[in-house]
Amino acid sequence: NAGVTQTPKFRVLKTGQSMTLLCAQDMNHEYMYWYRQDPGMGLRLIHYSVGEGTTAKGEVPDGYNVSRLKKQNFLLGLESAAPSQTSVYFCASAMGLAPDTQYFGPGTRLTVL
Amino acid sequence: DAKTTQPTSMDCAEGRAANLPCNHSTISGNEYVYWYRQIHSQGPQYIIHGLKNNETNEMASLIITEDRKSSTLILPHATLRDTAVYYCIVRVTEYGVTGGGNKLTFGTGTQLKVEL
């Protein structure tokens, strides 16, 4: 039981490049989330999903797209990376039932030059 | 969701109890208090949550005042591995897309440093 895994762990992009971050969970959770964390700050929600095939915008969605084609996977895409998207990205999942603890992955450290 | 106020940092001696306070004076009746922590560079980890009553699990205890305007997370015997940022989050449980997906709103938390 691996819990929540994220791929890749590190990545360096040039401005304008695109990439996809993959989040996978093996707990059969309905809800999945993508957060970003900038230095010295708390996590901010980018997008989330309450089930396969559904996605919704969070607090800071601009510049990102997501897809949830399979229940166990939640993909975060950057179509044209910008230096402002340099951050650590965390994925989380939850059952969607009380008490609804969120389980977090180890993070992806992204640098955009 | 109600706003929370936490001290920026705290120190604790190893083996002693760590008491982390959180003020949430605008909390409403259906909002829960959650605590998560984030050890350096790792993903946040759930610790405990409560509504009205005090709660205890294998990691910590949560004491909520009778008026619910503040709470305290207690780590009974802190170790060096408890050094982390601790987040107090107050929220209503709202499911589904229209309910916001039961998301968490993180502040800047309290940096707890446990020392020998």
Image: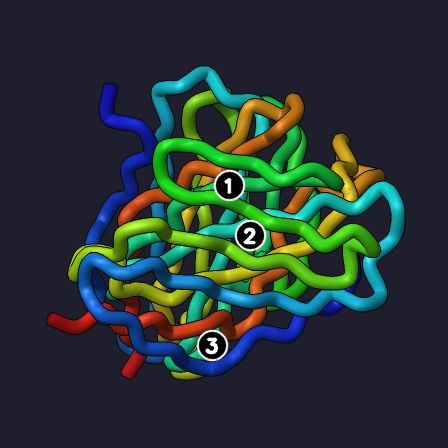
Q: Residue at x 48, y 44 (%)?
A: B61
Q: Name the foreground residue: A85 vs B88.
A: B88
Quadrant of residue B97 in the image? top right
Left or right of A17, for residue A11:
left
Q: Nearer the viewer, mark 1 or mark 2?
A: 1
Q: Residue at x 43, y 23 (%)?
A: A72
Residue pointed to by mark 3: A41
Please say if A106 is above or below B112.
Answer: above
Name, please, the residue furthest toward the right: B29
Please say if B60 is above or below B14.
Answer: above
- How is the structure coloured here? rainbow
Quadrant of residue A23 in the image? top left
Please say if A104 is above or below B42.
Answer: above
Kind of residue at disc 2: Asn
Q: Name the foreground residue: B85 vs B7.
A: B7
Residue pointed to by mark 1: B48
